[in-house]
Image: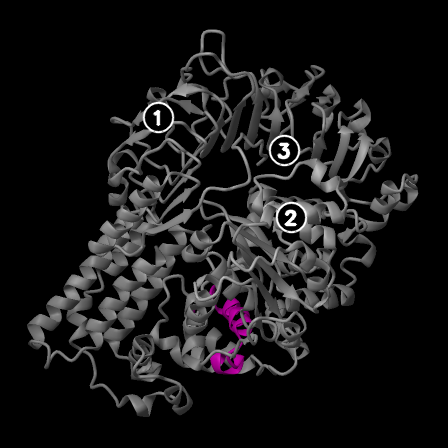
Amino acid sequence: MADALGLHVEQLMKHYTSDHSYIGGEQVYKKNITESFDNIMTYLRDMMVGYENEEVKDLLKQIEDMEVASGALERFEEPLMRRMMPRDLLNDVDVSNDDQKSFMTEMRFNADAYTHAYGRLDKMIVICEQLYNIRYNSKVEEEEVVGFDNEIETLLDQLTGTSTKQFQIISITGMAGLGKTTLARTLYNHELVKYMFDFRAWTCVSQVYLKKDLLLSILSSFMDDLTDDFYEMSEYQLGEKLYQKLKGRRYLVVLDDIWDCKVWNDLKMYFPVDQTTGSRVLFTSRDIDVSLHVKSARPAHVLRLRTAWESWRIFKKKVFRIGICPGVLWESGYVINRKCEGLPLAIVIASGLLKNNLSITWWRQIAASLRSFMVSDPRQYIDSLALSYNHLPPHLGRCFLFFGAFPEDYEVPVSKLIWLWIAQGLIHETGGKMLEDVAEDFLLDLIRRSLLMTPRIKADGQVKTCRIHDLLRDFCLRKAEEENFLSNDYRYGRLSSKSSKLCFPLELGKSLQEGGSVYIDTYKFLKILDIESIRLSLFPLDAVQMVNLRYLAIQAQDGSPHSSLSNLVNLQMLIILSRKNILVPKTIWNMVNLRHFYIKSGENLVEDPIFEQVSLNDGDFCPGALASFQTLSQVSPRSCHNICSRAPNLRKLGLCGPLISSLGDLEFPNLGSLEHLQKLKLLNTIPHPEVTRSCNPVMFPENLKKLTMSNTGMDWEEMWSFSLLPNLEILKLKFQACIGEIWETGDAEFRRLKVLKLHDLDMKMWVCSRDNFPRLQRLAVHRCLKLVSVPTALGKIYTLEVIEVNGCSLSVSRSAVEIQKKQESEGNYFLKVHIIKKSLSGATRPILEGF
């Protein structure tokens, strides 16, 4: 969406900088500018539908009142480009390259040459940025490779070309921060690569690795899910499984961030080297010698530093969401880019200092204080990294340093990170906001400052996982040690070669794994206990004696907690993974600080509370109410009859159990009064012999934004009732959620729906119009094996950005591609279609997922 807005603004800028004496005179010149301006206003109004508050109305009016067309004629006589542009920048430009010619056009005026008319253009750019940030505040843009077009073309040919069917190893090398991983990820996700390879896997190696972890990581990429049996296997057994899985198939495996050739020597026996399939292994490494030791088929692709114009493109993308820099900031922006010396990581970090402050004074200050990077030695970056850290407010600085608690290259789930921040006491209420909302704002702030990477994004644009670059992690460790922020004993670590997950604190985990006793006095002040990677027989009674715990995550054969759980008076987050359905004692309703109770599996019961009168903020009384309680997952609906009074501020709820009445109606406790509930999952465990009916929409809370349904067996005609949910943005229909050959949406209008996911459904035909989904941004169709095609009408939805097809028939894939071609023929190049071939990992089945 930002690209689309940026193109409209660029079109206006081109008309501005054209010479009206040669293109038809003043009248045509003014007409072109007026039309471009009108296109921008139309686009902005459409983009902000549903967001028309006073601030938005004021910003739109400011643009409308600019009289850009008339102001354009006040422009000055253009100075000579070569007099205005820095000489080293000009020498870097290839005038035969269209992108670089556009760069020259953009850079030919500097800030001192701007007149009043161009000041208006700058103001428009800034307002467009503000509007885009309001509309897509929490949406994170995907990483983009800049300047490696030739490398991508060459590597794609080596990966997918038919010139050789022999097994080959390909390597990408270069210093830290050059973009090796980003380039490899671009290749890995390329549509041609997805099409050509039966199996693709990505695993990050790093300096410290476990062979078992790597094998599990690769297998998990090929298979829908890994059972606990896999985690019990030896390295040799896992290797055999991998070998059998890959044998006779064309596969691509990416081993990211290899430090020496030992890892390949450990793994190569499990990779079939069939000379007829065209399989590939792709390495990324900082050491060019790695490619020699692993006998790579070709010399390593050694990445270079970016040129000045490539750096400028990266910089604009990172600072400005629409990709255009106001002219008054060009001079300072150029100085900053020059000091980054073509290193993408340096550019990204510098842009993080600037994107939230577009004042000329601030940019000039950063341009003056940003030290030149010594690209020959990454350790020299510490001073420059410190500049970014020193500009963080104290509350963000502590949250940033917390990343030093995680191992190198570890992807941290966002929900886990936020809960850990809160448990560690790093988040405090601000302006009446919930702690989780404050923490999410902090996270987005760190991302906007380019201090965090976002390897996984949810379908709705929200961040799913985040990680920190190795150099930044090194800085975190140094700074945390200086400030005595987090001792070595309380960092996440790996238990042993048998463990594939992390434990916190490490020493306590090792003791429990070896069957040792816990010395409570040693850990009496412990706030976080994450032993989910250790399989215990019963819920650990020792844990309930650690009264200062705020975060507890455990795994047990029988995870049912003892009633003494309520001794943990400070506990805020409780995560349980159990092999058996668990019974939660009624004493849990006495834990007034509990915020999130997340059960990861099964159909579980929570005992009714002891009926005591508990005062609420508004002066009312209700039994067992927990004012801070926000997450309850994987519980039977039989445990939730009084859920509205017990947890009035619940935000996320997952019901797992019998959800169909004897009459064939969807049935669960009335949730209408849960005014804060935003996410609801309904997983039915007892199928009804006939198609079922929906419930009364009033049973759903009005503010519900995300609904996931599985195995409910509803008639497609019942789907109209969900269109009545006024704030529904994400709808996921999974395994037999609806039954029938035809889904005809009729007059139903899902007014705010942004994401629609259809997963393992048996429908053959889908009939709809663009009016049914006027705000749809993303459509995912996974393993709907009987479906014939994607409705052509969906291509006419102007907000639609992505159609993803995974494991469906060839006709479905073709129809999606035809929709894209049709839109491109009409000038819409913003709709992307992703086709993923059917998984070869086995039969489809419902997957029980948490939040």
Q: How far is mark 1 from mark 2, CA to CA?
A: 48 Å
Among the 4 quarters of the image, the one containing residue 629: top right
Which label's residue is closer to the chain start, 1 or 2?
A: 2
Camera-nearest label, 1 or 3: 1
Q: Which disc number belongs to residue 724? A: 1
Depth check, mark 1 against mark 2: the one in front is 2
Q: Quadrant for the N terminus, please.
A: bottom left
Specify whether residue 357 is painted magenta.
yes
Rounded to the nearest angstrom, the CA distance separating label 1 from label 3 is 29 Å
Q: Which mark is residue 242?
A: 2
Q: Secondary structure at mark 2?
A: helix
In this rendered view, identify the residue nearer to me: 42 or 209: 209
- N-term-proximal mark, 2 vs 3: 2
Badge 2: residue crowd in 10 Å (few <14, some 14–19, many ≥20): some
Colouring scheme applied when the structure was drawn: one colour
**What secondary structure characterizes most of the magenta part?**
helix
Residue 550 seen? no
* 551 falls in the magenta region: no
* Residue 628: numbered disc: 3
Magenta highlight range: 336-358
Identified by mark 1, the residue type is Leu
In percent of width and height, residue 430 lies at: 58, 47
Kindly identify the residue that appears in the image at 23 percent across and 86 percent down: 78
| Residue drawn at point x = 68 percent, y = 77 percent | 379
Residue 646 visible in the picture? yes
Q: Secondary structure at mark 1?
A: helix
